Image (cartoon, rainbow, N blue to C red):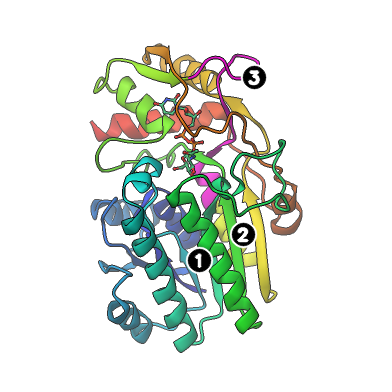
Amino acid sequence: MKILVTGGLGFIGSHTVVELIEDRHEVVIVDNLCNSKIEVLDKIEKITKVRPTFYKYNLTILEDVRKIFENHTFDGVIHFAGLKAVSESISMPIEYYENNLISTLNLLRCMREYSVKNIVFSSSACVYGIPKENPIDEEFPSNIATNPYGRTKCFIEDILRDCYIADNTLTITILRYFNPVGAHASGLLGEDPNGIPNNLMPFILRVAGGETDTLKIFGKDYDTEDGTCIRDFIHVVDLAKGHVKAIDKVKDAGVHVYNLGTGKGTSVLELVDTFNKVNGDIVNYEFADRRPGDVPVNFAKADKARLELEWVAELTIEDMCKDAWNFRKHKK
Ligand code: UD1
């Protein structure tokens, strides 16, 4: 199939492009490089021996999006592009709503104009807010994100449902990611945020790489076995393969929602200890106050994706830690 991948040079997007090409799909990428680098295109080519067509466009400009659809006949779209830093979204809500919503509306408008009927949307477990229990089922209340970034995901999910009501020939797949970490086994692709990172693994890598002295673990008095928060860390290559399964398996019109997680919770401290175990003792850490807004425990029920997409996460926490550090080392 010919697939348009928005945000295809970003962390999850680039890994997904590789898996799509390896599954023999033809890929066109649009990315405005606001949180990614053009060199990622060379790395994709190095891994797959294919250089996807690339547009450096901003999806908030409708005319530019239209040009892409004029030039190609797509079978489907995978929509990753969006701003995604939680703390930034709290201080810049207008920019977050403007960018994430207008991009999506422009994309959906062009899909309608050019009769492209299939979209996979990159959503997040943050739509579940603070869940009443774990593991989190797809049927749990899911319109209750706690910050503007998360609310853009909730709004877009609603917009997609409304688009389906208006056109019931659409095939819409919403993938709710848990905590993607790790990197491509080649060491060529990984998470490389511009500026100060927000998430745990990029911070661990900064400490391992000597850019920062000590990792702060936020909170050691949560009601968990070791007192630190629990997350469902998932290897980005597994996550990328989940998208290929969504493209290959979901054929029926409708709105289909899947959690992409491992189904297993791992504490922040366990992740850091595993990182040190597999990579040598290179991450100093100390405990700090809880980070406001953190959900204590968050992990997926992953059965629906296993049964319907025939997808399960296969890589381990050890793989995630080894591959993430391997990528960071190559970067030096
Ligand atoms: C956060 C967002 C989520 C978003 C996801 C990916 C919230 C409530 N959730 O998830 O909406 O989809 O990022 O961008 O903001 N930690 C440390 N030290 C650090 C960094 C993090 O101890 O230096 C801890 C955090 O307190 C948390 C865990 O590591 O307990 C994971 O944090 P993070 O990687 O930011 O992801 P989430 O909070 O799960």
Secondary structure beneath label 1: loop
Determine whether the beta carbon of the residue marked 3 sits less than 8 angstroms from the nearest atom of ligand 1.
no
Mark 2 and mark 3: Cα distance apart in space: 36 Å
Q: Earlier in the sequence, mark 1 or mark 2?
A: 1
What kind of residue is marked 1?
A: Arg
Q: Earlier in the sequence, mark 1 or mark 3?
A: 1
What kind of residue is marked 3?
A: Asp
Circle nearer the viewer, 2 or 3: 3
Which residue carries the number 2 mark? Answer: 245
- Write the start and end of the magenta stretch as one range: 219-240
Q: Is residue 50 visible?
A: no
Mark drawn on residue 24: 1
Q: Is residue 52 above or below residue 89?
A: below
Q: Quadrant of residue 183?
A: top left
Q: Position of residue 195 (x, y in %)?
A: 24, 39
Residue at image coords 29%, 57% = 41
Mark 1 and mark 3: Cα distance apart in space: 46 Å
What kind of residue is marked 2?
A: Lys
Cβ atoms under marks 1 and 2 closer than 8 Å: no
